[in-house]
Image (spheres, helix red, strand yellow):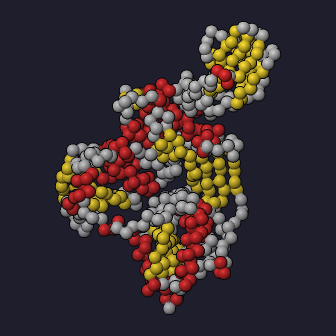
Amino acid sequence: MTVLASFLLAAGGHSRTHGAPDSDSLRVLHTTREAVLVVNDDNRKNERWWFVSPAIRPDICKTSARRVMFKSDVDSLVIDVEKGMSYDFVILLGNDSAYTRVKWVSDNPLEEPSEEMTKVAASGKLTREQAAFDLDALLYTFSEVHPDMFSVCPQGRLLSMAHDIKQALPDSITRPELFMRLSKLVAAIGDGHSSLQFPFNEVFTEETLRLPMKVDIDTEHMTMSCAGCIDGTVPTGADILSVNGIPTHQLLETMMEYASGERYFFRLERVRTMFSALFEMLYKADSYEVAYRTAGSKKELRCVLPALAFQEIRDRMPKDQSAQGASDTPYSFTIDSKRKTAVMDFRSFDDPKKMTAFADSMFTVLRQQDIRHLIIDLRNNGGGNSAVGDELLRYLSPRPFRQFGKSLVRISPLTRRLLNTDQTAPGWYWFDSDDMVVPRTAAEGHFDGKVYLLVSHHTFSSASSFAWAFQYFGMGTTIGEETGGMNVSYGDLVRYRLPVSRLWCSISFKRFWLYGADETDIHGMIPEYRTDSRDALEKAYQLIGVQGKLFN
């Protein structure tokens, strides 16, 4: 157990039990003495005496072992114990019978809290003690799962932060309020794959009165603009200068404290996806005075927007033309025959087998229609299964390639339980291989045209490793913003649910080095042509307009 685990470990706790079996099915242990030996997990060093007590019914023997043996002077009985279960038997001592129960209990209450601790009031609010328990359980689980939770935020500072949060807890607290406290702690760890999930459904009901305006965030310049407002009161695209007198940059800086990520621009991306929740928790009001400036104007304008329920906002919100026709599929493509160009909209690294079939179909069509330019759009791709990327890269790479150079994996007993697997033994695993992925041949459909990759600050995880390999192995031209995923980062996660509040958390248990990455120079994939991601497609077409002459 780690030092942090020992520091956090609380006392007490009871596990779940199951009812006793029928008396006819009870097993019997015979003894002529009042004490029998109990051996846990076949370890004679881990043994103790159990005194037969017929007056106690049942007489409960608690254990966290997987196997328990009761051994008397004339008999023995072995019980294989499963988590959360209890097992009843009878010890016969002369004419007396002792009804005995073996009950599994965790040796760590932070993993298996008592029923009393997890019982939440009808109001849904947690007590101060329950909230503090969840905080301890969260830190303990990170300490047991994450490869290095103090690599960004030093141990002293993170634990001091946890202490201050615990001291400031009120006597009772809601789940969303607890999220706001704990998410700052998780964000301080500085890992984009490790984050707390906001309980949206508890805050945003049909009746919730909220800000009747959608916003967009420029992650490069830390500014905010209107993406839609009731009755068009604030024009779409107008720069938002302040809300209720709070400047935009101050709003965003405050929200960033709750967003996980390695770089400021990726944390702003997280703020963009969580904006409605964070704004509701931090700046909720009956009405909102919005200061704004329209495009090309220096004049500051103001309006007051009332807080409205969802249905009224939807009825009064102008139709979002840009959202119409947006694809929900993980990958699709369209062809611009006039420009001999195909655009692949790649939104998620989902299902390697599906990608194999998709890529075969797409490149077959590209060959049949003599398409000479392929634009792959990763700007809205947050990652998924990296094996999907290998399937596509095999059609593009001019030479053998790899997405990852090496990785470090930490498997603890708790990680195995959270992953629900026993295939990997606890320990540290280091993978460093020169095995390369072989590209497809021309006969197998390798694409010999020009390829352009569009990326943004939102491009993360497997999407970022795809972009890195694409650029590193010279597969084509990269356009847009530095990716949100770093060349050295944590990844592959377990999902963990806090025992009392039931808030969901994701925690990394691996560390990855992309192929050729330098740990002294950590950054995302930096495009060859750096531009605002919103202008990346236009930039690709500009380049095609020049290079396309080669195919005339």
Residue at 44%, 79% in the rendered image = 541
User: Is residue 53 found left or right of 120 in the rendered image?
Assistant: right
Judging depth in this view, the residue of 183 and 150 nearest the camera is 183
Judging depth in this view, the residue of 180 and 91 nearest the camera is 91
Q: Is residue 253 visible?
A: no
Q: Is residue 514 above or below residue 251?
A: below
User: Is residue 122 found left or right of 543 in the rendered image?
Assistant: left
Q: Is residue 128 above or below residue 187?
A: above
Q: Is residue 32 visible?
A: yes
Quadrant hosting residue 238: bottom left
What is the x, y in percent for residue 479? 48, 71
Residue furthest bottom in the image: 552
What is the x, y in percent for residue 142? 55, 40
Residue furthest front in the image: 24
What is the x, y in percent for residue 11? 55, 23
Q: Quadrant of the N terminus?
A: top right
Task: Count up the numbered dots.
Answer: 0
Quadrant hosting residue 68: top right
What is the x, y in percent for residue 534? 39, 68
Q: Is residue 328 above or below residue 264?
A: below
